[in-house]
Amino acid sequence: MCQHAAGPSESKELLPEEENIDRTNTFEVDVQVDPEPLVHVAPAAPTGHGAPLWAWALLAAAVLAVSSAGVVFAMMPEVPSLTLAGWRLQLTSVFLGMAASVQFCKMPGDLKRRTLRKGGLLALSGCILAVHFGSWVYSVHQTSLSHSLLFVSSTPLILAGGAWLLRKPISRGELVGTGVGLVGAVLLATAAAKSDQQVTLHGDMAALLAAFAFVGYLLIGQNLRSWMPVFVYAFAVTGLAAVLLTLAAMAFEGAQLLQAGTGGCFGWAADTRYLPKVLYLAAVPGILGHQGFNTLLRYLPPLIITLALNVEPLIGSFMGWLVGVTAPPGPWTYVGGALVMTSTVAVTLASHRREKSAAAAKHQYERLVVDDALDEALSWPAQGKREETLWPAGTLPADTAIENENEEGVLEGSKGKPGGFSRQQQHSEDWRRAAEAAG
């Protein structure tokens, strides 16, 4: 509570705009400041400038790591898809569990309770992750590696298309990019499927289902990862997905708990043909790849990481050709793949520009709201006691009219009146509309 009182006995030099104000009465302004800060200043996002050299080396290693996962899956075509997907997550969950136990023990009690209360969202995320891995491994076994990687990496196109369907803010660049990507996807699923013997429509659609599932996984993770430690979140979700895939392998593929080899739920652990490959999948794509990207978010902007991930289909296809698990793509795969990859990069860049513009407009609007609230608190006429509350940033109604009582006892709005809103307040509606238009 801040108070200022000026009595008639005080001698004070008046500013020019204050010379006509009657100060014969006691003048007191009470300003109540909300306990929440008027503007929440977020930590500065990483820009990439001045990032340590090892961060760029880790980015290259992480891209190579995740690009190689599909190649290793393709090297085990005799293992049923759900069984293989379960193998991929079982050992990764063990590694994540060791790190998660350390993080969970260090968490304060209120954060632990909050994590437990979010068990439903964690379970949903785990189910979606199981669908993602199960359908993707199936696609690797049923279509060409190039097609599987192209479709499973189309997440930015799906996000942009979903925003358009839900009538959410979307830029023209995102719309055009999504349209080009759709053309490329149609070419991959039709012309390329006829000219390439490795390509199948149901395999391509399985990879597309994996991309849709990954969108759901990202949306839930965006909510929980803003406050939940990375390994605690990753272990809970990955562990549940591993359990679900193992149960699905038992139900639909006849996998046995204690059998070694391709027919066992944990058959990789007792078979030297598969043990090295599963160890690689868990340690390299699982830990170095995915957790490496989580680490890099502290040093590199998300745009750079997303763009780097967009080259996964190209690198993975080249790796698969080098080790002999896939034939060179047909001509229509090159055409459709080029359209999909180009559109994915275009949508990513357009989305980044739109979000940056929206953030700048919102910041400018919040600054204007704060300035208006402060100006309003100091501009009441010096007649009687007025009390004004400063609203938190972004919550001041732009069209609020404070009513004053004139000399005849009639209530009238204070917009444009002396002692009412400042000239800045009258322009805040323009800023509000600009911020809403920007998203």
Image (cartoon, rainbow, N blue to C red):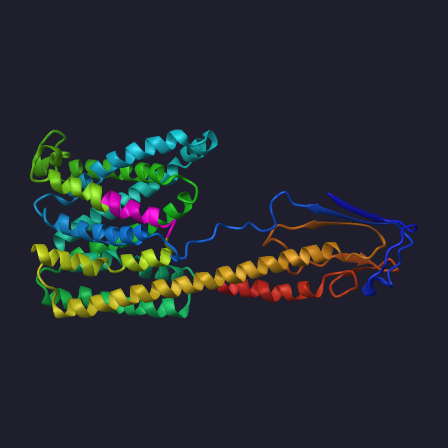
Quarter holding residue 347? bottom left
Depth order, front residue of 288/326? 288
The relative height of residue 281 versus residue 111 in the rendered view (above or below) is below
Going 17% across and 43% down the picture, which residue do you hit? 280
Q: How many marks?
A: 0
Depth order, front residue of 62/376? 62
Going 35% across and 62% down the picture, which residue do you hit? 348
In the rendering, at what x and y percent does residue 150 appear?
22, 60
State whether the magenta stretch is mostly helix, strand or loop.
Answer: helix
In the rendering, at what x and y percent does residue 354 appear?
44, 64
Depth order, front residue of 375/78? 375
Depth order, front residue of 279/265? 279
In the rendering, at what x and y percent does residue 173 appear?
38, 69
Residue 342 appears in the figure = yes
In the rendering, at what x and y percent does residue 353 appear?
42, 64
Q: Which residues are magenta?
A: 286-299
Of the 4 image quadrants, the one containing the N terminus is: top right
- Does the magenta run of residues contain 298? yes
Left or right: 312 as drawn, with respect to 219: left
Going 48% across and 50% down the picture, which residue do you hit? 43
- Does the magenta run of residues contain 240? no
Residue 439 appears in the figure = no
Left or right: 340 as drawn, with respect to 252: right
Left or right: 392 as drawn, with respect to 3: left
